[in-house]
Image (cartoon, rainbow, N blue to C red):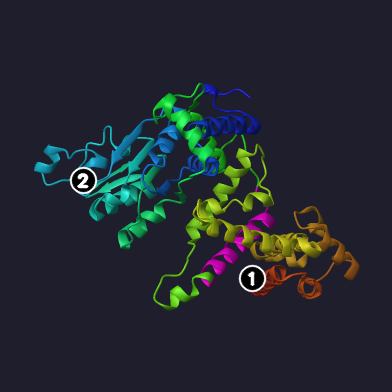
Amino acid sequence: MAHKGDVIHSIEEISKELKEAAWFIGQRVINREEIIEQAICALLTAEHLLLQSRTGVGKSLLAEQIFAMFEGASIFRVQASKEQQPDTYFGGLDLEDLKRGRIAHNTEGSLVESEFGFIDEIFDANDFTLRALLSLLNERRLIRGVQNVPSKLHTVIAATNYLRVNEVTEALLDRFLFKAVILPDKDPFVQYRISQRYLVHGGHAIAAPKRIPFVRLQHMHRIIAGKSDDFSINVTSELLYFTNVVIRHFEFMRNRSLHDKVKEGGSDFYISPRTQAKSLDLLRALALLKGRSEVLHEDVSRLYFIFATVGLPEEVAMFKKAYQTVYNSLTASRGFDQVQVLLDFTELLEEIRIQPQLLKEPLHRFADSPVRKSFMEWLKERFSGEQPVEQNKKMLEQFLTDFVPVCDEVRELKGSVDRVLQSTLIVAERELNRLA
């Protein structure tokens, strides 16, 4: 498929291109394949990545080599320090505006005007500067005084040797959706391979024989965000529900493991609705990396890229366990099929809520809608002919009464759907009475 600037490729071609980039980075940064994949996901979703490790394990090389895989993007680099002020990141103050009592930065060449940013030792920066960075990292806008300008910033990779925790840095950490800890690998063969690369390239990033145009990365991001007219990556309603159950189960497991610390005054583990929503972009990114136009259950198992810290085996293992527990429960005895039936049933209820007059029509008319055939087959077995409003209401209620969940996850969903049903019937009856 052709396009201006050769931006648009097939899903398979995009996947191949990204795999080749990951392979090249992996040849330069040894034994970091998982973090490289996580970093590519950060780029695809236009999110930020925080790398933590002790000194000398190649954080800077990793960031520089990742950014070196793209052409047509400017890179802002800075080594943070306590003496720095926000103008280090936003550009110097405009003196003429300052004379008039107005704070405005000349953003040319700053982080604001760059597509990529690398901030080394980010927690060495003072809290005043870190607070000033928050809106730029999150909203992609420079907001200082009366100055409010959009930023071209796509992704920042930050590196640190330590975490400094307070109110400001917690807010900063929330801006880095992807986090990884790089542990030193003392395996002699791994060290040998690292030494080989160092002898040739001296620990510096090198230009790849084939680079990805930044405009193509932007197009990949539009696909991930569901904003591309050329390609789409499908997420079914059943998989969407499954994803949220896995996330909740992981949150429960993390808090259970932190129970004693919380009682002693420690903080609990909390996944914000914003982070949970952004996990959908990651799911589509993971499917894209595999060359698929549909998200599969196995992609959900990789959501630890944002809900856990890559490089910490206990956190990653806990997420994988949460995934496997829920997956096994729903796989047994057609649990996934039951979830889909109930979710399709809620679509029927939503139609009735929007158009209460539908209750006056035979429910058989929905056989051609997305509602599963299982509901229609049940309907034909229990009822026949056109039904009045009261009979239709009984039919809808009886369907849920007859529905026998096969596992706890489906049982909980049935309870939620039953509440939607009762609410829908109340709203529909009130509207029908008003129109009578």
Residue located farthest toward the left when viewing the structure as drawn: 99
Asked whether residue 206 is in view, the answer is no
Residue in the image at 54% along x and 55% along y: 313
Which quarter of the rendered picture does the C terminus lie within? bottom right
Residue in the foreground of this view, choosing between 361 and 75: 75
Question: How crowded is the residue under tag 2: few (<14 C-alpha within 10 Å), some, or many (20+)?
Answer: some
Mark closer to the chain start, 2 or 1: 2
Residue in the foreground of this view, choosing between 313 and 107: 313
Q: Name the kind of residue labelled 1 in the image.
A: Glu
Question: How crowded is the residue under tag 1: few (<14 C-alpha within 10 Å), some, or many (20+)?
Answer: some
Residue 370: % across, % down: 75, 54
Residue located farthest toward the bottom when viewing the structure as drawn: 263
Label 1: element kind: helix
Question: Given this view, does label 2 or label 1 mark the residue nearer the observer?
Answer: 2
Residue located farthest toward the front when viewing the structure as drawn: 188
Q: Which residue is mark 1?
A: 431
